[in-house]
Image: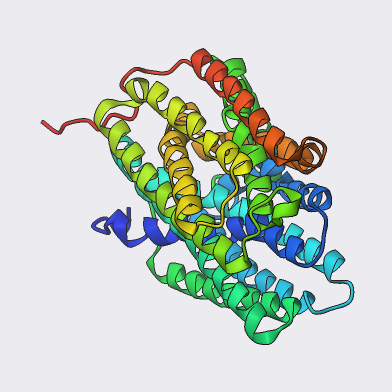
Amino acid sequence: MNNRNQSPWSWIPTLYFAEGFPYVLIVTVSVIMLKKLGISNSDVTLYTGWLYLPWVIKPLWSPFVDLIKTKRWWVTTTQIILGAGLAGIAFSIPTSDFLQWTLAIFWILAFSSATHDIAADGLYMLGLSEGDQSLFVGIRNTFYRIASIAGQGGLLIVAGLLEKSTGTVRTAWSLTFLIAAIIMILLAIFHIKVLPKPNNDIQSATSAKQLAIGFIQTFKTYFCKPGIVTAVLFILLYRFPEAQLTKICPLFLIDPLENGGLGLSTEQVGFVQGTLGVIGLLIGGILGGTAISWKGLKKCLWPMVIAISLPDLVYVYLSYFPTDNMFAIGSCIFVEQLGYGFGYTAYTLFLIYFARGEQQTSHYAISTGIMALGMMLPGMISGQLQEIMGYKMFFIWIIACCSITFIVSALIKFEPDFGKKKTEK
């Protein structure tokens, strides 16, 4: 690297905060915002489910991120676009056609955020050795989740307080997104100054012909990888239960008791799910990264599969025994998210493992595109399923879906010691 002595700690935490912050606003905070603005559960999950599409199809343009400009250039450029787009949301919410305008801008944000993910993950892999990738996967997931605290925790609490102080839901959410825009612009300015410049972060295409050949070759080499069928099934279905929970959980927390929910206010949701829950994710992610770095992915896989599945039972409990005790609610969500943070680490490491090779940035992007498809389709129909089943039966359905996670985890193959940090001799 040109700045050879630069510590990963100087850029990985803020880079993955900047990756997670717009994502949580687009796919999670948008759900709560539309719910508070009077949109039904089925419409909320359908509209926001479509926002996953850019992450699904991002492999179609991921080769261009590999072949044109540098990963560093793509990271800083997309961060500037994201800041401007969040400001656009802020100014659209008070308008009479807010739904059309905000959804349109959310689409632009989603495409920019998906492109930013490609470049950021590429810079991560170019800038770190395999051992450091394993060690810092927990750190990067941690700061990604800190971004979730800032977005679905801190900003939701701010939105709830503004709802009370202004007396107007639209004004409160407009100001909230304006704050988010300022945060994103400041991150862009910071990264222009501090991101590393790996020597191998170069533009590799110099003509349209080379670009076309590189594009085709990227997909050909990915889908000819050994074990591609089982890998795709694992990437697509490992998070099948979570794909549905992600959309429904905040709606469950907000809906009044007579509708089967818990009747929490916006700031209470920000505290229990966006703060306590994400703290659980942070701890789980750190423990997961440390465990894999120490023992390797093979020895950690099944404990992580169990951890990501069984704690979903807390939502069955809360739906059958609703309570207004914030300690009880917060404890349940903390436990579930702790398990998820620990279990998700195995998934992240497998994506890195399967992307290895000359075109690892594009191959990683293809894998995350498949992952996004696995989040998008179940999420889109989750609102309709919940309205048909009710919250109680819906959460039992989620527990049944965890069996799919176990099945696809049993199918995958990888090197036994992958992820284990090598001891220097």
Residue 157: name its quadrant.
Answer: bottom right
Residue 246 x/y as whole percent:
63, 45
- Snapshot colouring: rainbow
Q: Residue at x 78, y 75 (%)?
A: 92
Q: Residue at x 63, y 23 (%)?
A: 400
Residue 312 x/y as whole percent:
54, 35
Residue ranking furthest to the left: 425
Q: Residue at x 32, y 31 (%)?
A: 292
Q: Is residue 415 above or below residue 29?
A: above
Total number of numbered discs in the rendering? 0
Residue 363 x/y as whole percent:
56, 34
Q: Is residue 378 above or below residue 145?
A: above
Residue 212: name its quadrant.
Answer: top right
Q: Is residue 84 above or below residue 56?
A: below
Residue 19 can be seen, yes or no: no
Q: In the rendered view, does 257 fall on the left or right side of 303?
A: right
Judge by depth and name the residue closer to the eye, 41 or 131: 41
Judge by depth and name the residue closer to the eye, 90 or 414: 90
Residue 374: name its quadrant.
Answer: top right
